[in-house]
Image (cartoon, helix red, strand yellow):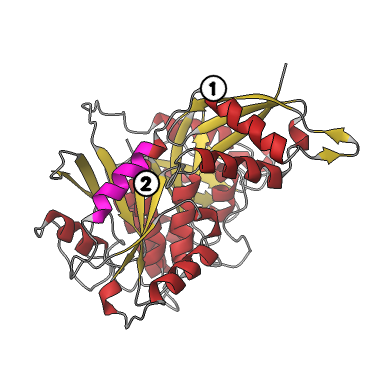
Amino acid sequence: MANPVVAIVGRPNVGKSTVFNRIAGERISIVEDTPGVTRDRIYARSEWMGQAFNLIDTGGIDIGDEPFVTQITEQAEIAIDEADVIVFVTSVKEGVTDADEKVARILYKTDKPVILAVNKVDNPEVRSEIYDFYSLGFGDPVPISGTHGIGTGDLLDLIVKNFPEDATEEIDDSIKFSFIGRPNVGKSSLVNAILGENRVIVSNIEGTTRDAIDTKFTTDDGSVYTMIDTAGIRKKGKVYENTEKYSVLRAMQAIDRSDVVCVVLNAEEGIREQDKHVAGYAHDAGRGIVIVVNKWDTLQKDSYTMKEFESHIRSEFQYLSYAPIVFVSAKTHQRLNELPKLIRRVDENHSKRVSSAVLNDVIMDAIAHNPTPTDNGKRLRIYYATQVAVKPPTFVIFVNDPELMHFSYERFLENQLRAAFDFEGTPLHLIERRRK
């Protein structure tokens, strides 16, 4: 199941981004006492009491010089569409405003749970002033301080309590993969080309695909796949800048349900920052990854074009050095028959287990060729290692002092594991623990 989605909505300058950062546990959104200042990332993965969820800050929507009422409307409507739980943030300092009532009227349209949070309750003296917010019609307001963290635990308890119950899923052994990337890189065209039918609407208009669409198919060799197509959110009114930002939210939801993620690049347009953002989330989530360069037929090529393009990808996506690259064309079907086989191989590597005996032989050989580092006269000692998980393959290395494991030596050990075993397409997690 995909992680639940929590949207933070409210009029400008009530502290939405501060609350977002507090819940996310890090400073992600830009915070400033100027309405509408949020410009960068507006999504994060968070967790409370063992329940993971995706968080979005609707303050990241920017529609230029339009009045704030228009912005508020767009933010709230997108939240209604996308979220499982909506946190309606207000401010105790200004009390209930006309803009708050405007947001409330929009949120009345949804049947999704809405939690009313009154922000900037920084001291007990103003706590009694929250009762005015009952007039908004969303039950008991939750007093919080995004700046100081007051009340955020109570808010998170309510958020998790309102998550939809997990539906019982039938056992599905198919290989689940998704296409992610910026709008208009050709994700839906790839879906149609692989299926050989117009299962998904294809258009050059960014954001044609409204929802993630799962399609199961079987290849000639009997392998069963479930293909998840996700595209940018549809445009509403004059919301242009945020379409790519909300396509990232769609990608996050698809990544959560995928075994393998195909990061789609547009050969015509090259690599953009948004490509790195989306691919980075797939890497952080520990999914198997294939880099798919689409529209390869549109380039004027010579014998060096592919090699040069691959070098450019490796330079821009250094953290994805393990991911295979395939150059395809949804239009001409060039190399498209290779993609399912490559996805299956990456899925197998993503699920691979290595016996402890063989694993420790490889690590001891690596230490013999490149001895462990020292720090202030103290040498790192590696006693043994064991694999504790798959998807992605995760290894615990027992040492005398985890602080002595330098990043460069950890990378060396990872490279030795990749050289000894075929881990193409999958990240590896190495965890150092002190031997008791």
Q: Is residue 313 above or below residue 397?
A: below
Indicate which label's residue lies in the foreground, 2 or 1.
Answer: 1
**Relative vertical location of residue 258 with respect to residue 66 in this rendering, above or below:** above
180 lies above or below 268:
above
Residue 132: tell me if it is visible: no
Q: Amino acid at mark 2?
A: Ile
Q: Tell me which corner region of the image, top left, top right, bottom left or bottom right, holds residue 359.
A: top right
Residue 255 tag number = 2
Q: Nearer the viewer, residue 43 or 357?
A: 357
Seen at 76% across and 37% down, the residue is 372
Mark 1: secondary structure: helix
Q: Is residue 136 left or right of residue 215?
A: right
- Residue under the image location 72 percent in, 41 percent down: 370
The x and y percentages for residue 384 are 65, 23
**Magenta range:** 338-348
Instruction: Give the quarter of the figure containing the N terminus.
Output: top left
Mark 2 and mark 1: span between their CA atoms? 30 Å
Residue at 52% across / 42% down in the picture? 418
Q: Amino acid at mark 1?
A: Ser
Residue carrying label 1:
356
Q: Is residue 248 left or right of residue 130?
A: left
Left or right, residue 33 beside residue 318: right
